[in-house]
Image (cartoon, grey):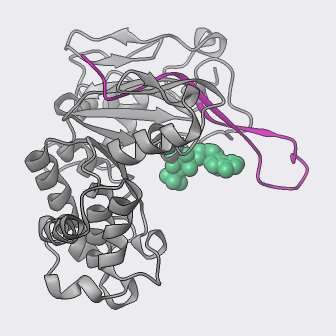
């Protein structure tokens, strides 16, 4: 596979934001992430709040430099390029859609100006061609032409997100990274925006990285689902297998907590909060909440194992059995012992 974008052993360590007792603490936002996104595929990213989903998205689009490791776009290392070249490569090849279109769009610019801006930056076509492209973009995302002169404040939340999507599409990228693209929207328009993204992906042959708290939606939209826990990818599964045949206990627990209509299961309770990213546990970071954890889990984080299904990999010393249903797992689950 020739990856569009590829992370190899990517780490992001921040200085802690708080100025309190632990002011000098480091936050391990991303730890040893290997991920390749192929042209045309949809990769969903799930995990609890603070597990590094947004950091991963920012690294993928070249706005966050990894503290360690590499990010390649079309086989070229982004961070060894001169800055101007990196901006050009990323700006033309990768579009980003953020969570909240109210803050992501410049309030003083009209829709037309917002959509023209990336075309001007990338010097695309003549003046007339750019105007034509703006009209085409508006039609692609289902915005009436009459809104070209509107300011973001005059639009509904859904319309604003359509503008943000059109802006991401303006330079005709190959990859869109969407970080929680519907969570700031009214429930009534969420499905419309998701369907729009899926439709555009199909029509334009885009690859899509889709980050969301809503794991059922991620599963429905994606070809592959990445499960993250405390800055690490712990499972990378074909979307069709992730609900009932995930091998990592955390993925099973996460999906059991939002059962779909077809596979009702009792949620697998996880004991305690996610540990702090400033002090991740030794070994496997999930071990402090995992009912299967033992001494070996405290000692080292296993590398990826391959499941029997193609393109399915997970990092766990004690994976859930391939044929073990989540329902059985809930029934047989032993009280958690401290590892
Ligand atoms: N600029 C920063 N400075 C310090 N810590 C940061 C910074 N950005 C992120 N973090 C921390 O890094 C960790 C990962 O954050 P990130 O936003 O990537 O998680 P997330 O999974 O996207 O969370 P959410 O679902 O709540 O948006 C968190 O502990 C967060 O507090």
Of 222 and 119, the residue lying toward us: 119
Position of residue 165 measured from the top left corner of the image (x, y, whole percent): 28, 62
Of 173 and 129, the residue lying toward us: 129
Task: Report whether 202 appears left or right of 190.
Answer: left
**In the rendered view, would you say 255 is above or below 281?**
below
Q: Is residue 314 visible?
A: yes
**In the rendered view, would you say 290 is above or below 99?**
above
Q: Is residue 15 magenta?
A: yes
Position of residue 75 measured from the top left corner of the image (x, y, whole percent): 38, 21
Instruction: Identify the residue at horizontal 42%, vertical 62% (top origin).
Output: 99
Q: Quadrant of residue 242?
A: top left
Q: Quadrant of residue 126?
A: bottom left
Instruction: Identify the residue at horizontal 13%, vertical 72% (top origin).
Output: 142
Q: Is residue 271 magenta?
A: no
On-image quarter of the C terminus = top right
Instruction: Identify the residue at horizontal 16%, vertical 69% (top origin).
Output: 132
| Residue with the most extreme bottom position | 154
Position of residue 32 measured from the top left corner of the image (x, y, whole percent): 56, 22
Position of residue 82 measured from the top left corner of the image (x, y, whole percent): 57, 34
| Residue with the most extreme left position | 203
The stretch in magenta equals: 1-30
**In the rendered view, would you say 61 is above or below 283?**
below
Count numbered badges in the picture.
0
Q: Is residue 335 visible?
A: no
């Amino acid at each position: 596979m020739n990856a569009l974008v590829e992370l190899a052993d990517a780490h992001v360590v921040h200085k802690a934001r708080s100025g309190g007792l632990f002011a000098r603490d480091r936050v391990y936002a991303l730890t040893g992430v290997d991920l390749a996104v192929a042209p045309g595929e949809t990769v969903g990213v799930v995990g609890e709040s603070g597990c590094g989903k947004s950091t991963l998205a920012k690294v993928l689009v070249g706005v966050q430099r990894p503290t360690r490791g590499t990010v390649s776009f079309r086989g070229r290392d982004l961070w060894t390029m001169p800055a101007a070249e990196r901006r050009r490569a990323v700006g033309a090849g990768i579009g980003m859609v953020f969570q909240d279109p109210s803050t992501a769009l410049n309030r003083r610019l009209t829709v037309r100006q917002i959509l023209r801006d990336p075309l001007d930056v990338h010097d695309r076509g003549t003046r007339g061609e750019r105007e034509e492209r703006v009209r085409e973009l508006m039609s692609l995302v289902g915005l009436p032409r009459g809104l070209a002169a509107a300011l973001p404040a005059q639009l509904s939340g859904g319309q604003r997100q359509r503008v943000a999507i059109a802006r991401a599409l303006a330079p005709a990228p190959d990859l869109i990274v969407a970080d929680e693209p519907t969570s700031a929207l009214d429930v009534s328009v969420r499905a419309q925006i998701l369907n729009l993204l899926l439709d555009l992906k199909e029509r334009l042959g885009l690859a899509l990285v889709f980050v969301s708290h809503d794991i059922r939606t991620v599963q429905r939209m994606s070809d592959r689902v990445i499960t993250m826990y405390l800055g690490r990818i712990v499972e990378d599964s074909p979307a069709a297998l992730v609900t009932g045949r995930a091998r990592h206990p955390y993925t099973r627990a996460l999906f059991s907590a939002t059962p779909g209509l077809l596979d009702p299961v009792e949620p697998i309770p996880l004991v305690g909060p996610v540990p702090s990213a400033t002090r991740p546990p030794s070994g496997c970071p999930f071990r402090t909440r995992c009912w299967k954890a033992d001494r070996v889990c405290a000692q080292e984080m296993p590398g990826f194992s391959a499941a029997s299904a193609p393109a399915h990999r997970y990092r766990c010393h004690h994976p859930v059995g391939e044929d073990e249903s989540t329902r059985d797992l809930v029934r047989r689950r032993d009280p958690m012992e401290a590892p």
